[in-house]
Amino acid sequence: MSEYPGELKYAESHEWARVEDDGTVTVGISDHAQDSLGDVVYVELPEIGTDVSAKGEAGVVESVKAASDVYAPISGKIISVNETLEDAPETVNDSPYKQGWFFRLQPTDLTELESMLDANAYQALCDSEEH
Amino acid sequence: MLIYEISSEGRSATAQYEACELENSELPTAQLRVSPIGLPAVSELQVVRHYTGLSKKNFSIDGEFYPLGSCTMKYNPRGALAGAHMPGFLARHPLAPENVSQGYLSCLYDLQEYLKDVTGMRAVSLTPMAGAQGEFAGVAMIRAYHDKAGDSERTEILIPNAAHGTNPATAVMCGYTVREVPVTKEGDVDVDALKAAVGPQTAGLMMTNPSTCGVFERKIQEIAEIVHDAGGLLYYDGANLNAILGKVKPGDMGFDVMHMNLHKTFATPHGGGGPGAGPVGVGKRLEPFVPTPIVGKRSTNGEDEYYWMSDKDIPDTIGNLSAFMGNAGILLRAFAYARLLGNQGMHRVGEYATLNANYMATKMAAAGFKLAYPNRRATHEFVVSMSQEAKELNVNAMDFAKRLLDYGYHAPTTYFPLLVPEALLIEPTETESKEELDGFIEAMTQILQEAKETPELVRSAPITTPVKRLDDVKAARELNLAWKAAD
């Protein structure tokens, strides 16, 4: 069974977002997403300093089954990326919510998070997709 | 085993080596090779055995049923090849003048006419050398059309999320941004979402119909109206043309431009990377932009004369896409194939392809497999979801696919379309017999039984093939294709 931590916000396109103490936002892909993709073999991260817009492309995750775009759940500027994924993309499978994060951004408007799904709503979406 | 590994110094095979005196006097000394080229040193018999051995390890349409969904791995009659191999075609120089090429040109002209007729398009250009180049030509024409109208604000191409990955790649290559349009649970384009997505920024919509979900888009006329009303054009991806060949014309559905994969629908064995042929057809709006050359016909002194039409005849053309006439040999095969089929035969392609797919879908559903779109009639292919087997038995779509190899069947397409979890996309084509289809269904049924009783067997398949289960994760993460001799 996939995990859906309650403290995170989720996008319909299967990214999660977490607000850090300093007001920045960390983004990754959900446990359900990594499980559906299967073994991740390649991750393309955005460049630090780029501006991303909500639902805009911010990276690529590729598994043996498929290549998918990763979208920024909210608008902002990329301030750091998880470079370990470049050499060890399997980290996304092993630890989607912790070591497997993709990037961190300085949000333009934190209230954009409010339009994202909470854990329960996101889990319901994932369950419905399986049928 | 690589041929280099059986190499033995000093061995050679010269029986078929054409003796000739090489005059290298014009080449600068500094450019002449001094070290050996490093070719394998083997006898002729070793070469024959080596490559015949490799070919026997291969799955191919000549040996096995090959239901690789969306690839249309049909049997291509040898007669089409024989026609294209006539000495007059083989020996013709690509720069030979028109007056000694009338036979060749007439074949291409007639092929253009057949393709126009079967697709409902106004003009066809045969030059694109593959499906991807055909797509590029099509979207480049859409761009040329808007540019000519001074309509430079159109920056977006709409693409349903069931599309082949080549569609967004093509749109980006032509300088457009891609906007995805969702597909409903029944496999149709979400018309409300489409209405919300179109606007003055819409350059066009790229669609495959029937879609990769193996169903026909029921609201295609409404979709065409929505896109046209917004000022956009409709692109038809011919990947699944086999399903409707001779039955429905993309031109009648409202499409402005399309490509045809002749290597799929019109008689070329494929799957090894080519050569392909991706002619484009255009409707009225895009006719002025069609890529050159195309073959024209005029009457001179009461006799038909065929000639190359260039940018002199089609001033707004997007230009040439290849040095000569595309992949001429493939075009000739397609011509021969069309002649072999005839008008009636062409109609039966779509009929039998659809009949075979629906027969299989119905029987597989009865055998306990879950169809992804059970309420829809399948087209030439259908999607089975193995998500239940994956969840309950821990045997997934890939395991079934691998086990099929042990039963002597090429696997269907796996994990595509992406919309369906644990997807198997199965396309039998029109050229398979009922016995072959029954054999495949029987094999799937047996594998399902194995998955319940001895799941480990299915998970470790294939066990009878020369190469066992590949570690595709390792292959992707540590790609290494270079062979290096041991020192």
Image: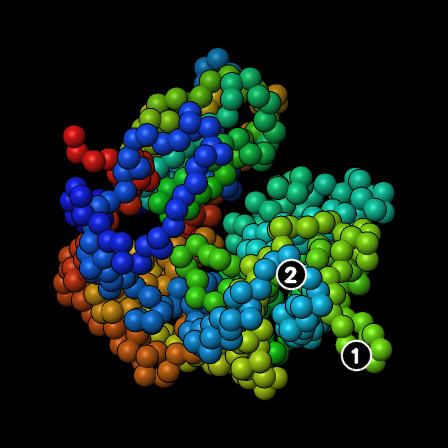
| Residue named by callout 1 | B303
Quick check: B1 left or right of B354?
left
Q: Can residue B9 be seen in this view?
A: yes
What residue type is disc 1 on?
Glu
Q: Is residue B452 visible?
A: no
Establish if B218 lies above or below B158. below
- Mark 2 neighbour density, 10 Å: few (under 14) some (14–19) many (20 or more): few
Numbered-mark total: 2
User: Is B34 in front, or is B169?
Assistant: B34
Rendered location of residue A102, percent (x, y): 43, 27
Pointers 2 and 1 within a single chain? yes
| Marked residue chain, label 1 | B
**Amino acid type, callout 2:** Ala
B37, above or below A87, in the image: below
Q: Which chain carries label 2?
A: B
Q: In what element is the residue under mark 1?
A: strand
- Viewer-side residue, A108 vs A79: A79
Q: Mark 1: few, some, or many residues within 10 Å (few <14, many ≥20)?
A: few
Residue wearing tag 2: B96
Residue B234: quarter of image: bottom right
Write the residue at 38% across / 35% down. A42
Q: Residue at x 57, y 29 (%)?
A: A74
Between B174 and A109, the one lying in front of the other is B174
Determine the residue positioned at 20% across, 59% down: B45
Q: Element under label 2?
A: loop
Image position of A131 with respect to B172: above or below = below
- Asked if residue A11 lies left or right of residue B306, the reply is left
Q: Where is residue B71 in the image (x, y as percent from the top left)?
A: 45, 63
